[in-house]
Amino acid sequence: MKKKVLSVLLASAMVMSMAACGSKEEAPAANNNESSAAAPAASSEAAPAASSEAAPAEYQLTEPIKVVVNGTVNYVKEDSGKEEFIAALNEAVSEYMGYDVTFDFTQLDHSGYVDAVGRLFAGGDYPDVMVMSADMFKQYAPTGLLWDMSEAYDNAEFHARMTLPAINENLKDENGALYGFASGYGNGCITYVKQSWLDAVGMKAEDIKTYDDFYNMLTAFTTGDPDGNGVDGDTYGFISAGLLGNEAPFINYTSAFWQDSYPAILQGEDGVWYDGFQTDATKQALLRLQKAYADGVIDPESYTFGTKAAREKYWSADQTGSAGVFEYWAGSWTENIYNNLEKNGVITDLVSLPPIAEVGAYLNREAPVWVIIDDGDGDNARENAIFKAFCESMLDGDKIQTLWTYGVEDVHWSLKAESITSGSGEKEKTVEYKEGEFHFRNTFADPTQLFKKNNIDNALVVSPLTNGYSDSSDMVDAANKFFTENCVDAPVSPASETLTNESGNIHDAKMAAISAVVIEGGDVDAAMETYVNTVGATVEQILSELNG
Amino acid sequence: MFEKKKIITSTGVEVRKKPLGLRIWTNRGYYVMFLPVAIFVLILNYWPLLGVRFAFYNYKPVGEPVFNGFENFTKLFATDAFWVAFKNTLELSIMKLLITTATAVIVSIFLNEMGNLLAKKALQTIIYLPHFMSWAVVAAVASLFLSPSVTGMVNGMLRDWGILGEADKNIYFLANKDMWRPIFYIINIWKETGWGTIIFLATLSGINPELYEAADIDGATRFQKMRFITMPALANTILTVLILNLAKVLNMFESVFVLYNNAVFEVADVISTYIYRQTFAVALPNYGYSTAVGLFRSLVGCLLFVICNWLSKKVRGRGIV
């Protein structure tokens, strides 16, 4: 009897545990039902009512707007005033829309964003709005998943105030459909050089005009003692986050070596698409990289480094093993790199090197875009409401745009009369601000640093703020000016079904060729032959789709 | 047509089998206890198997799945990268299994021979510990140690010892096709040997001490005792461990994923990492293709399992299921 009682008790315990686990597992599904599956259902139920009783524009969003972002929205990161930002955004957008609107943000891993979105979609969890890189956008645009926002965009309130209308006009397809909305232009990478290292090896930035000059500088950084620790040869000339990126414009971290080569499928001046990887220019670029590796002027781990690892090594407190030259994003990143060097006690100015003659100009990448997921119910009322609440309000020129640009008043920035101290050690400085003077406040994570921007860069935005608030950083302004004066638009990314299916395999084949030539010091023609044997037929198929 | 098999006891009494319903009622306690387990298994192990059908579909994150017959398998068998991954999976798994088992046996024997109990326990604890470290941490530590940069510890040591000369470049261990596999095996030995010794030490502690005493009387040396008593006693356990693990050789993922990179795909890419890249490293993956790869892997896994079961019956006299 005791055994039976015990068995019943044990079984009950297991059932309870299963129920507990079950409820845990069911939570996201329940959310899904409410927010993604049920939301369209709700809209489809509500839509006829809306269309029969009221105009579609008056559709009211009753569920939170689900937004998926990468690392480019700074204030939805933990310890960055996330709660304050979302609360302020909810309030401001509710005011803008005339009824309560709330946002539910999901921030995915920045460097693994494509993977993370794939996992999200694999789980059937579609957001309402999400950010996509140009590359990703090109692949999703023809699928029918994205909502054509062209009409909403053309009628948007900000349209009349736009200073860079061409950015979004260029995103429209041949039928005039607009599946993604760019709030700013793309930005790109520039070459940073540590001034103190230049001084240590007796070189001047203004003398670096050609690849030979550039290479001599890298060699001097590698063989000399630019960090001043008394040891020659324990530093590198160049460090990068990979030798070839996996999204457009691919070469922006190593443009000095790729120069006139663009190792991706691109369109020639005659309108014909071709594979830029199978060109002599690419072979020459690989040979340049091979020599640089053999000479040890590139940190060898650049091949496997991601952006975080490369950045941190560049500004590390111990400069042994660091590098003097780093190609990275312009604009606010200029200040970010400088501040991190300073924070780690690396006393140096940061030189933005004009593109060397062989590079000609830095590449302005195709802008990342906000897309709205089409719920597929055939009614645009809900999507129109989401466009207005998210995209249109984002560029209202005032309150909401300020939130997206600088964050929350008296959290991230302020107009109050106060003194703000930033920097540390010798670089510590205190600035007294008068009442009404716009200024950033100290970050929560590191009180020696100031907040910079949230998502929109005021210097890059397609429709500027009208309230006059401006980031007072001369360094960022100068960096943006420097980039815009020295950039050209990156080649347009292609869109083809085979490319969509095979882009991963093609990238693997390119990396295998790069590895064979650069890391192993192999023959470039043999590596190219292997590349052609591996994915040549696939590339031909893509080209026939594009040129057909 | 089918006659019921009679059950007769050793005393010749025929046992009448009770009806199923009655047997269930009699053992209802056990059945109640088993019910949650059955539900768990059905939901978590069998329900997901329904997804196998997508191996025959073109199934992308966008739109409805479209049946495409064996197209995914045709593509799979025509893809070189898949066969490279398949070959690597078998080679890496089997080599890893053999090496880690051999190391675990050797370490177990040495531990067993240690007279100082305190030192033995301390050493056992030290070699167990790496097993509890996550692969991500192990990979981060290994990358630091093996860095080809001037700050890399192993390269620094090779340079200090004169193995790398002035003119030699630092070795990029984790991006070198010739070095990656040895490094992978060494890291696996370091991480898993301690854990692997548990089962062998248990076997060794079960050897009758009288055998050793008798050997001592006969004047056997320590090596002879190891050779003629310890090793034969361990042989069956070694075979059992090998056979049981052979059925799981295709499940390799994490240890490779955290240590490999594009430069060594040729020697390091395994089926699981290949599936991962096909599924998550492209913007619009075809889940149907990934499922087809997974299904093929499962079928090969099943085949290996059947072989292992047969081997187990041969060696141990009973199967592994």
Image (cartoon, coloured by chain):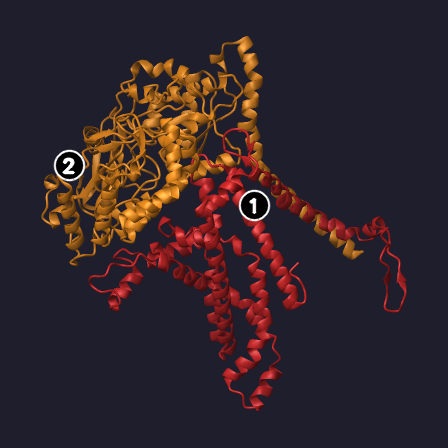
Chain colours: A orange, B red
Please give the chain letter of the residue carrying mark 2.
Answer: A
> At 16% from the left edge and 46% from the top edge, which residue is drawn?
A215
> Residue B17 lies in what quarter of the image?
bottom right
Q: Is residue A297 above or below residue A55?
A: below
Residue at x 17% of width, y 59% of height: A231
Q: Can residue A315 be seen in this view?
A: no
Q: Look at the image and tell me in which quarter the N terminus of chain A lies.
A: bottom right
Q: Position of residue A138 (x, y in %)?
A: 39, 29
Chain identity of mark 1: B
Measuring from the top left, give residue B235's x and y in whole percent: 58, 72
Q: What residue type is labelled 2?
A: Ala
Inter-mark Cα distance, 2 to 1? 53 Å
Question: Which residue lies under the disc numbered 2?
Answer: A357
Q: Is A15 on the left or on the right of A360, as rendered?
A: right
Q: Which of B239 and A496 is in front in this view?
A: A496
Residue B232 showing in the rendered view: yes
**Which percent across, then down, holds residue B256?**
44, 53
> Against B71, is A222 above or below?
below
Q: Which of A245 and B309 is in front in this view?
A: B309
On the image, which quarter does residue B12 sit in? bottom right
Is B134 displayed left or right of B311 in the figure?
Answer: left
Label 1: which secondary element = helix
Viewport quadrant of the C terminus of chain A: top left
Count how many numbered circles sit on residues in the image.
2
| Mark 1 residue type | Leu
Whole-percent x, y for residue B75 in the image: 49, 41
